[in-house]
Amino acid sequence: MATAELHFEDFFRGLRSATGLGIGYVPIGITYGIIARTGGFTFLETVAMSLMVFAGASQFIALNLLSSGVGPVQIVFTVFMVNLRHFLMSTSLRDKIDEGSRPLEMIYSFGITDETFAVSSVESGKVNPAYMFGLNSVAYFSWTASSGVGYLLGGGLPAVLKESLSIALYALFIGLLVPSARKNHGVLFVAGIAGGLNSILRLVLSPGWSIVIGSLIAAVTGTLVFDNGPEATHNGSELNDSG
Amino acid sequence: MTVDNLFLLFAAMTAVTYIPRMLPFVLFDEVEFPPFISNVLKNLRYAILGGLILPGIFLVSEDPVFGVAGGIVAFTLAYLDIDVVFVVTGTIGAMALYTFVV
């Protein structure tokens, strides 16, 4: 059953869709590797954290907290808070991905990062587990490999390059959002409200909570504005299927 | 920290990262959400994308103009319907030029 669900065509579609993400991860992974080395990690530890945790923001936070002498319990708790948004992402992606078996879901959900979420959720129509595996394998490989490369490079990257590379993931997010927004301005409305709320809430809440609460309010607002009534419910699905 | 402790820490981090990613698939497997919730969840995709961009893009550099300029370049390239790979690489290139000039 599980093998019947793995269609190569979709796997390759996943690989192709991940090209931008694969490039976007490189500078971030390299930066992570450099910081890990500076923080006293060995090569093995640097790559192991990427292989095991596979979460950029969480890994940077862990490095930061470790270097300021914060204990492991607080680190794990902070990482958990930061990752709460992934609960929302998976809940939202759930009906975007054509049903696979439970074991498949439990495997590919390991690879749901901000970026793989972003890429898969703007695909037009539904995707399937094979697509998710294609997408995830590029992301996973790019992230762990560039972590290792970053460690080996050490401080060897010129500052000018480092600074300009820091824009990569934001360019990826914008590059994914705009095509959907072009087709439906509701997308821009919802994303804009979420970004605005997140900017304000960030001042009083932790980043983990602020994105969770800001996105929820924006999504509800968007639904109330654009999906008011059965006709509009239809528009609501169009909004997303066209994306 | 000793190596043993570090790997224990990684394992705990893996758990608190993986569980929120995996749990909705298991929890809501049999659940059919009502249309309103279903629409909220669809809008949530774009909401989260917005939250990932703002305010982070302004904080990416000490120079706030850097993030704004990068955002404008990326938006323009994406609006021209250029493949996302070139949106990413084009923006990096433009910002390398910016950093070099400014």
Image (cartoon, coloured by chain):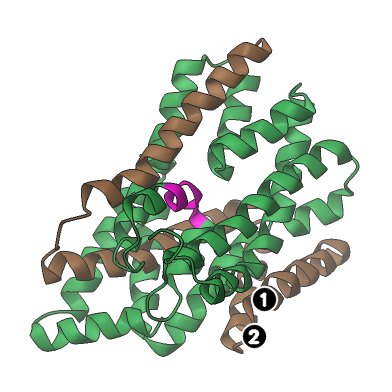
Q: Colour of chain A?
A: green
Residue A45 location, x and y as percent?
A: 70, 26
| Residue B75, numbered label | none
The numbered disc on residue B82 is: 2
Question: Which residue is painted at 63% across and 28% down in the image?
Answer: A63
**Color of chain B here?**
brown
Q: Is residue A72 left or right of residue B99?
A: left
Task: Tally the marks.
Answer: 2
Vertical position of residue B14 compared to residue B62: above or below:
above
**Mark 2 / mark 1, whichever is N-terminal:** 2
Q: Secondary structure beneath disc 2?
A: loop
- Give yes or no for contact between labels 2 and 1 (Cβ–Cβ under 8 Å): yes
Q: Is residue A99 magenta?
A: no
Q: Quadrant of residue A97?
A: bottom left
Residue B55 visible in the picture: no
Is A218 on the left-hand or right-hand side of A195?
Answer: left
In the image, residue A190 above or below residue B24 = below
Assign the magenta stretch its main secondary structure: helix
